[in-house]
Image: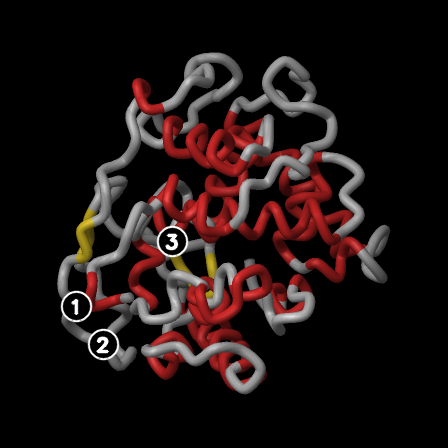
Amino acid sequence: MKRGIWLALGTTAGIGGALLFSRRASAASAVAPASDAPEQSLPTIDLAPLPRAADVSGDLSRNWGTTPVDLRPLFMLMEEIARIPGAARVFGVIASRESGFVTTAHNGNAAKEQDERDDSRKAYLNNKDRNPPLRYGDQAAEFGSGGLFGALAPYFLWTGVPEIGKKAPLLAARPTLVFQPRAAAFGAAVYMQRLLTHYRVDDIADIKAGWANPGLLGKGRGGETYLAVRTRFLADAKTLGVDLADTDTIPPKLDASAWPGVPTVFAGLVGALPEEFV
């Protein structure tokens, strides 16, 4: 979810491998960015705990492969709240590549980490004048990417802007909020909806191509990068043990036409942020 992607996904409102810490699929975290980032100590942000099996109605046993059991209800809740049937297991395959299911994943090896920070700086500088201001914009610019779904910090904090503008819920949050699984889930659900709504998505693997760069669903379709991303995604699904051809759990094409709106999805996945971040 990187490199100009939210700009490409935006409509009238502008935009639209990880360093593995200890596995943390908890409700709260106080993880600091890498040592050369501007923030060194951050307060704990307490969101609702991870959803459990009783919080969702979907099947949590069939066609999940080795997807971590504690994260399956989160992925299923994303599907149910966003009203995108079949999306849960696709979110799982995407997270396996973007974070290895480590909720506090942040950037990557040294070279990649620098690359991601270069990208977040460019994302912020190129889009800050056309979007609502971020309270922690400078920190977002220096953050790089992270969380379950590999979100680039400025775009993550601008989640929802194309739909609801200045009412987007993360504008006053710190970029480390992406380490919160429910917040990361919100960003990913909105992102998938915009891909499915605004781009030609022929099959499930096209979703991952768009996740890498929405241009791959346009002029880049059929090119070397497009084909490589699709191939990796199909391999990731096989490694994880998720059968993308199981039409009982994943339709051949996902449909976001029942999308309930950004505020509803935020309320269902995140609930509310502490007052100081609103």
- In this figure, which residue is indicated by the disc labeled 1? 42
- Mark 2 belongs to which amino acid? Glu
- In this figure, which residue is indicated by the disc labeled 2? 39
Residue 147 is labelled as 3
Q: Quadrant of residue 136?
A: bottom left
**Which circle's residue, 2 or 3, is located before the other in the chain?**
2
Q: What residue lies at 45% left-to-right and 44% top-to-bottom?
A: 264
In three-dimensional space, the C-alpha distance between marks 2 and 3, rounded to whole angstroms, equals 17 Å
- Mark 1 belongs to which amino acid? Leu
Secondary structure under tag 1 reads loop
In three-dimensional space, the C-alpha distance between marks 1 and 3, rounded to whole angstroms, equals 16 Å
**Which circle's residue, 1 or 3, is located before the other in the chain?**
1
Residue 64 falls left or right of residue 73: right
The reply to whether dot 1 and dot 2 touch (C-beta < 8 Å) is: yes
- Mark 3 belongs to which amino acid? Gly
**Please, which colouring scheme is shown?**
secondary structure
The reply to whether dot 1 and dot 3 touch (C-beta < 8 Å) is: no
Expressed as whole percent of the image width and height from the top left, the position of residue 238 reads 59, 27
Q: What residue lies at 48% left-to-right and 21% top-to-bottom?
A: 64
Expressed as whole percent of the image width and height from the top left, the position of residue 19 reads 35, 57
Q: What residue lies at 70% left-to-right and 38% top-to-bottom?
A: 205
Q: What residue lies at 59% left-to-right and 33% top-to-bottom?
A: 84
